[in-house]
Image: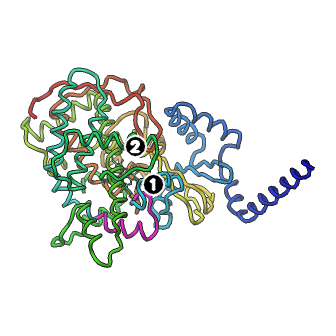
């Protein structure tokens, strides 16, 4: 009797699996043609990645080295394809078709709702069109007083850490939130000294615990020099209709929400605010912390950056201007090289809604696949960068950039869904880092080979961002 029931259940299951297979036959056939490890190998690799998170990066690099241009992995009927060739990456990121984020991004849904990072279709398109101009260069230039003032404040705050090793990430996190609140959010009321730290802490806790979170609230000339493709941010800057009133992010959003006929609800404003605070905060905090650590390790390069800064500021205490940032050529290359080796967003994923015939090979990736693009892997490939594990800011000399494929360096992603805060981030990083380096000499208390990377949404160090500061000029 029991055996009969079991047999019937097995038969029903077999028929259901067969029907599912037949319905998706093309998907399974195309998927099975792609190169990748066998199930047993996949399982082993999966178990490997369940070791400490720092192992994930080593495993990912090993897999990429073994599989040349692409690798597929089956997770049951779910197909993931990692692309390592910049030509294939361009097919996805540069396209106006493959714009949907993969289902993994739904983890952010309770937090970001329909915010720009995860929305799709017309909602994303309309909101992007509205938000991108709020990061216009003319608006960014007006943020310099806040960039300067808050950067100086953090220099003062870090004074108590002088002469001993400390984790700079907490400070970089706090200063980043304070700058975001005052610039993008236009938050002008007096706040407690530590409000930036409080927000940063709240974000860190919620990320770990994953509950629903209440809403708390260039053309940098060298940059486009062959390292990234033009996007809507460039178009906004170049097609400037001078007279038009430009509003900063939250003002523009609020005004839009109040206008009749504009489909921007209060909830959507909240979602965009949460998205910008998250995307703008953790990424830039990790980026600036990594730069301080790298300069702390590479004293010779730090000496040259300091020389560049002294030539710009002549040891005065005047604030950094937009023009100064254009002269910070070496500091810019140092930031870009740091974002190459330690991209704050190490992985990007998209859902394919159409088949894609790859450019690097004859394979076709079927609709329904999750495409995984890892800036960390692209940036560490010897095919894209000679000696990829060596910190070398000269990788970003204009002639070197021109030799590379555009999509081999994508710390801010690229194409229509590229980072909307890219120019903001680069300007802010320059002002913040220049201010710290005018005031202090930085040393790293850990050798680069001993950095322990943490595989997470945002790339960080599990061992902390340990540096030590000494006075250089007590100018502020
Ligand atoms: C070093 C700093 C930063 C890095 C490395 C970075 C990187 C990225 C990357 C890789 C993406 C694409 C993510 C994906 O497709 O899954 C992205 C998207 C985004 N970033 Fe950034 N970001 C930085 C700073 C900022 C800042 C300062 C802001 C805002 C103030 C910001 C706002 C956004 C938004 C809103 C998106 C979604 C854009 C869209 O889908 O249309 N980011 N960022």
Residue at the extreme top of the image, as rendered: 163
- Horizontally, residue 245 falls left or right of residue 121, namely left
- Seen in the picture, residue 267 relative to 401 is either above or below; the reply is below
Q: Quadrant of residue 336?
A: top left
Q: Residue at x 75, y 60 (%)?
A: 21
Q: Give neighbour class at mark 1: few <14, some 14-19, many 20+ (Cα, 10 Å).
A: some
Is 389 or 346 nearer to us in this picture? 346
- Quarter holding the C terminus is top left
421 magenta-colored: no
Residue 1 percent location from the top left of the image:
93, 50
Is 293 or 313 nearer to us in this picture? 293
Q: Residue at x 74, y 61 (%)?
A: 20
Mark carried by residue 214: none
Give the mark, 1 or 2, whose residue is nearer the N terminus: 1
- Horizontally, residue 116 falls left or right of residue 328, namely right
- Seen in the picture, residue 106 relative to 232 is either above or below; the reply is above
Q: Which residues are magenta?
A: 116-132
Q: Quadrant of residue 17?
A: bottom right
Q: Residue at x 12, y 38 (%)?
A: 311
130 magenta-colored: yes
Assess mark 2: CB under 8 A from ligand 1?
yes
Residue pointed to by mark 1: 110
Residue 34 percent location from the top left of the image:
66, 52
Residue 25 percent location from the top left of the image:
73, 62
Q: Residue at x 53, y 36 (%)?
A: 56
Tag 1's secondary structure? helix
Residue pointed to by mark 2: 343
């Amino acid at each position: 009797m029991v055996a009969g029931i079991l047999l019937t259940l097995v038969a029903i299951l077999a028929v259901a699996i067969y029907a599912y297979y037949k319905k998706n036959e093309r998907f399974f056939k195309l998927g099975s043609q792609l190169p990748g490890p066998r199930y047993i190998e996949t399982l082993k690799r999966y178990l490997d990645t369940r070791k400490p998170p720092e192992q994930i990066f080593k495993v990912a690099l090993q897999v990429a080295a073994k599989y040349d241009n692409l690798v597929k992995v089956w997770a049951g009927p779910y197909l993931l394809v990692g692309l390592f060739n910049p030509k294939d990456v361009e097919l996805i990121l540069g396209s106006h078709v493959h714009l949907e984020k993969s289902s993994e991004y739904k983890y952010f849904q309770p937090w970001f709702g329909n915010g720009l990072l995860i929305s799709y279709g017309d909602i994303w398109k309309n909101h992007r069109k509205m938000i991108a101009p709020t990061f216009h260069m003319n608006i960014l230039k007006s943020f310099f007083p806040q960039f300067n003032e808050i950067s100086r404040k953090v220099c003062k705050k870090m004074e108590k850490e002088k002469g001993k090793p400390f984790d700079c990430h907490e400070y970089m996190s706090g200063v980043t939130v304070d700058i975001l609140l005052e610039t993008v959010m236009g938050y002008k009321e007096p706040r407690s000294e530590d409000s930036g730290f409080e927000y940063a802490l709240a974000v860190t806790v919620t990320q770990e615990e994953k509950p629903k979170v209440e809403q708390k609230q260039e053309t940098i000339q060298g940059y486009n020099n062959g390292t990234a493709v033009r996007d809507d941010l460039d178009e906004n800057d170049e097609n400037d209709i001078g007279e038009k009133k430009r509003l900063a992010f939250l003002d523009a959003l609020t005004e839009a929400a109040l206008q009749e006929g504009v489909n921007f609800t209060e909830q959507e404003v909240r979602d965009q605010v949460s998205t910008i605070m998250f995307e703008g905060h953790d990424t830039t905090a990790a980026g600036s912390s990594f730069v301080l650590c790298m300069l702390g390790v590479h004293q010779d390069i730090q000496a040259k950056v300091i020389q560049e800064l002294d030539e710009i500021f002549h040891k005065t205490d005047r604030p950094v201007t937009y023009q100064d940032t254009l002269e910070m050529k070496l500091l810019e290359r140092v930031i870009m090289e740091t974002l190459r080796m330690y991209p704050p967003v190490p992985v990007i994923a998209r859902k394919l809604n159409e088949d894609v015939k790859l450019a690097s090979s004859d394979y076709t990736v079927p609709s329904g696949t999750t495409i995984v693009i890892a800036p960390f892997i692209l940036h560490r490939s010897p095919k894209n960068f000679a000696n990829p594990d060596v910190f070398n800011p000269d990788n970003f000399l204009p002639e070197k950039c021109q030799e590379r494929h555009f999509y081999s360096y994508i710390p801010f992603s690229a194409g229509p869904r590229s980072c909307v805060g890219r120019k903001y981030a680069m300007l802010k990083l320059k002002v913040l880092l220049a201010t710290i380096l005018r005031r202090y000499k930085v040393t790293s208390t850990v050798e680069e080979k001993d950095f322990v990377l943490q595989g997470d949404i945002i790339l960080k160090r599990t061992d902390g961002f340990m540096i030590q500061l000494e006075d250089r000029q007590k100018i502020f």
